[in-house]
Amino acid sequence: MQRRETGRFEVTAAAGERVRAFVPAPLPPTPAIEITSQRQKLVENALLACGRLDAVSGLLPDAGLFLYTYVRREAVLSSQIEGTQSSLSDLLIFELDEAPGIPFDDVVEVSNYVAALEHGIERLAAGFPLSNRLVREIHAELLSRGRGADKQPGEFRRSQNWIGGTRPGDAQFVPPPPQEVEGCMAALERFMHEPAIDGALVKAGLVHVQFETIHPFLDGNGRVGRLLIALLLHHDGVLRQPLLYLSLYFKQNRAEYYRLLDAVRATGDWEAWLDFFLIGVRDTATTAVEAAHRLLALFEEDADVIRNLGRAAGNILRVFAVLQRRPVATIDYLAAGSGVSYATAVRAVKTLTEAGLLRELTGRRRGRVFAYDRYLTILSEGAQAL
């Protein structure tokens, strides 16, 4: 299909150089996206997979449990794409105030991402519209601490940025000049509020590319752009809980991801990008459903082990219930969360460790941290540091 220009170039100054910055045309693309029978099948399969994910989250004893852990898994993966080296267990240990010792810079970026995503979820749940104001609030949370805190958190950029290369002159891509950012983002906000002509999934795929092309912030654009997909699908009713996160798919297919973004900007090949995106939605939702079923089976299998432990089983099951919500914990946390005494929690942890359900992570005599190992293994698949 022949497309007209996907945007225009403006000459602008960046770091003392004159460069051509790309200003994208507003969405939707012109001419309209070509929805062939094959592409429509991809849309339907992706929606079916999202429906299964929505349904399986309702089977869990606590849907918030799945959201809690999946949000943190996504935070780790999305931050890894930007170069951090933190693992899921690093983040969960960091969140235990009584368990210091995790390297600060990397894990605080991941913790900020959790705060940003949870802020977005809470605002949408309270009826706040998905808007540029909310996007800026999310960005402010993302850069609230650590690296990037000096990069205008919560504000659209007022200077030129670039992607790739050591300087603007050899950059892979130069986003719009700063004076164009407000207008581009206002147009994107209007599109987000329009009815989804080709469906919510296609709309989310278009919005993601447009946001990454505008690159409205000095730092954190990739993380906000990936987070925006989950919030859009939640906002538009595809998922009751924002449980679909594509960072692992993008991480595993990085070269193709960047190639397709460039192809949209250069030639207007939205269709190739959308095929890639829809396959990612389908596969990611399917993998999440499988993980939920595996967690349900794991919880039941391990609960059976505990029930066979005799009179102590009742208290141990109370501690075990806390571990399902928080798979990395201290004895103090487990005692408080389960309502048992510290001494009872110590005995329960000792029994669970001897049964192979828990593993101590620190090697210390005091301030020990225990992990529900097989649960953490399921969640950490693909989330190992790059």
Image: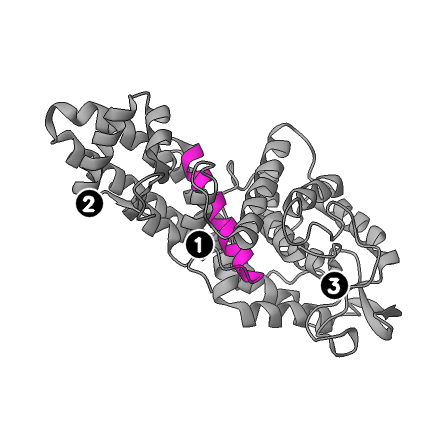
Does residue 199 appear anywhere in the picture? no
Mark 2 or mark 3, whichever is nearer to me: 2
Mark 1 or mark 3, whichever is nearer to me: 1
Left/right of residue 6 with respect to residue 350 in the rendered view: right
Report the disc number at residue 356: 2
Q: Quadrant of the N terminus?
A: bottom right
Q: Position of residue 154 (x, y in %)?
A: 74, 45
Image point (29%, 47%), residue name? 373
Report the disc number at residue 31: 3
Q: Position of residue 218 (x, y in %)?
A: 74, 57
Q: Position of residue 246 (x, y in %)?
A: 52, 55
Report the disc number at residue 220: none
Labels 2 and 3: the sequence-earlier one: 3
* Residue most extreme to the bottom: 170
Labels 2 and 1: the sequence-earlier one: 1
Report the disc number at residue 87: 1
Q: Amino acid at mark 2?
A: Gly
Labels 1 and 3: the sequence-earlier one: 3
Question: Residue 85 lies in magenta, yes or no?
Answer: no
